[in-house]
Image (spheres, rainbow, N blue to C red):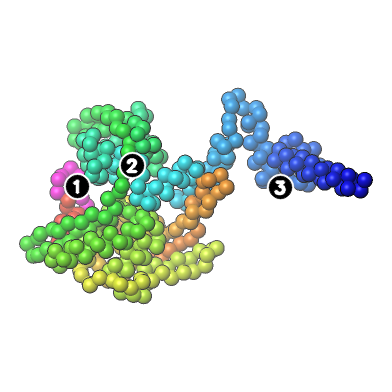
């Protein structure tokens, strides 16, 4: 008989626990005196509002949609209150795409773009990409996606619209300068491998110079960078132009390893300061290549890890910086996973150049040799100035 009562008691406990879990997840169903005692105000209010919207909104709304909106709202409040342009919430789908970009592969049409007033300016068309096969050329403007204008829309949102599942189609509106005529192209998306590092030799009147372009600081990029510099040396280069224009950065570790290609061991690359992570100093790891004169080419879209590398080469190796001032980021982020499969990318600290400068406060890196490329010409005037600075 005792065993029966024990079993019955256990069933009752489990039943009460289940009811408690259900009520805890549905605070609107709790009596007020219990709700005040058992439910945290902020969390309870969030769940209560979600329930009320699901039950009463005139159209059916899923809880996942509301959760995404709530998280996006929190991050928007942080960005607005603390002038933080970089913290983001990634839904599970957006996180997959973000990680694809970090790995150097994504599903899209194969363009490198810069945001302009009218939409997106095409800076580069990747080889063997759908964009190249469709005849899209650098200098054209993407002004619409699937019939919707992207004038004034952030580059993050605009490029997200252009990307999509492999094999799906996207229709983009393209405008050529100076005619201003717009044409529409329907392009089939495909897997695109970013040409993260490209290089060649520039033959100048005073000798050979190596040209190396880095598109981002994705995982492992320091390897191709080293190979490109070594190749230029073997071909007789007497100096290197490192082109970081349009490079929005990426992984901090890759900035440190990339600096190690050029600088001897134990040179300071960057220092960081964080409320939660403390103070850290990142130094080169050794194994640098033989020293060559360096000019670093930057523009307004050179940011984050690209600025870290630029400052390290300027401060530690005396590299000439050519172009326009850089973005001026000065803070770094950490990706924090969420239980729904998404993540928060939160600003967690500030970083400083080897000379102790925070680039957000200084307005970015200011070039030694000001230079600007004129998109209306076929010449690359900024590159010509960089080659001249090395000569």
Compared to 230, does 382 lie above or below?
above
Compare residues 295 and 165 and report the one nearer the observer: 165
Tag 2 residue: 191
Mark closest to the chain's N terminus, 3 or 1: 3
Whether residue 263 sits left or right of residue 387 in the image: it is: right
Q: Residues within 10 Å of mark 1 (few under 14, many from 20)?
A: few
* SS label for mark 2: strand
Q: Secondary structure at mark 1?
A: loop
| Vertical arrangement, residue 192 with respect to residue 63, above or below | below
Q: Is residue 375 magenta?
A: yes
Of labels 3 and 1, the one closer to you: 3
Tell me which numbered mark, 2 or 1, is placed earlier along the sequence: 2
Indicate the position of residue 272 as horizontal and vertical percent values.
Answer: 45, 66
Circle nearer the N terminus (3, 2)? 3
Residue stretch in magenta: 372-379
The residue wearing badge 1 is 374
Mark pair 3, 1: CA separation? 58 Å
- Check if mark 2's residue and mark 1's residue have beta carbons within 8 Å: no
Which residue is disc 3 drawn over?
Answer: 40
Residue 110 location (% of width, % of height): 29, 42
- Is 303 situated left or right of 94 in this image? left
Residue at (65, 41) in percent of width and height: 46
Residue at 65% over, 36% down: 49
Residue that sits furthest to the left in the current view: 205
Distance Cα–Cα, label 3 vs label 2: 46 Å
Q: Could you tell whether 266 is left or right of 127 in the image?
A: right
Q: Residue furthest top?
A: 58
Vertical position of residue 189 compared to residue 40: above or below = above
State the SS at label 3.
loop
Q: Is residue 183 magenta?
A: no
Residue at 25% x, 29% y is 182
């Amino acid at each position: 008989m005792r065993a029966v009562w024990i079993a019955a008691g256990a069933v009752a406990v489990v039943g009460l626990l289940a009811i408690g879990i259900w009520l805890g997840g549905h605070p609107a169903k709790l009596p007020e005196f219990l709700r005040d005692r058992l439910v945290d105000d902020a969390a309870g209010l969030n769940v209560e509002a979600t329930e009320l919207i699901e039950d009463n909104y005139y159209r059916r709304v899923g809880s996942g949609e509301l959760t995404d909106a709530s998280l996006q709202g929190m991050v928007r409040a942080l960005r607005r209150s603390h002038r933080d342009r970089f913290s983001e919430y990634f839904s599970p789908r957006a996180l997959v795409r973000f990680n694809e970009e970090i790995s150097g592969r994504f599903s899209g049409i194969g363009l490198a773009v810069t945001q302009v007033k009218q939409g997106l300016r095409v800076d580069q068309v990747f080889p063997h990409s759908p964009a190249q096969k469709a005849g899209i050329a650098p200098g054209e403007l993407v002004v619409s996606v699937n019939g919707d204008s992207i004038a004034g829309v952030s580059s993050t949102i605009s490029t997200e619209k252009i990307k999509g599942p492999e094999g799906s189609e996207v229709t983009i509106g393209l405008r050529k300068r100076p005619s201003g005529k717009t044409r529409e192209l329907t392009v089939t998306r495909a897997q695109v491998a970013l040409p993260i590092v490209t290089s060649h030799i520039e033959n100048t009147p005073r000798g050979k110079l190596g040209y190396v372009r880095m598109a981002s600081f994705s995982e492992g990029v320091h390897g191709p960078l080293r190979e490109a510099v070594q190749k230029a040396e073997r071909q007789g280069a007497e100096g290197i132009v490192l082109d970081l224009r349009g490079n929005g950065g990426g992984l901090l570790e890759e900035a440190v390893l990339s600096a190690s290609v050029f600088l001897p061991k134990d040179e300071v690359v960057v220092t960081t300061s964080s409320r939660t992570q403390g103070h850290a100093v990142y130094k080169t790891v050794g194994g640098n290549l033989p020293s060559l004169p360096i000019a670093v080419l930057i523009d307004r879209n050179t940011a984050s890890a690209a600025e870290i590398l630029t400052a390290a080469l300027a401060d530690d190796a005396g590299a000439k910086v050519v172009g326009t001032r850089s973005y001026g980021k000065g803070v770094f982020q950490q990706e924090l996973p969420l239980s729904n499969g998404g993540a928060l990318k939160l600003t967690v600290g500030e970083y400083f150049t080897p000379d102790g400068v925070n680039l957000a406060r200084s307005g970015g890196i200011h070039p030694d040799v000001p230079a600007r490329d004129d998109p209306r010409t076929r010449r690359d005037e900024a590159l010509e100035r960089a080659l001249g600075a090395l000569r």
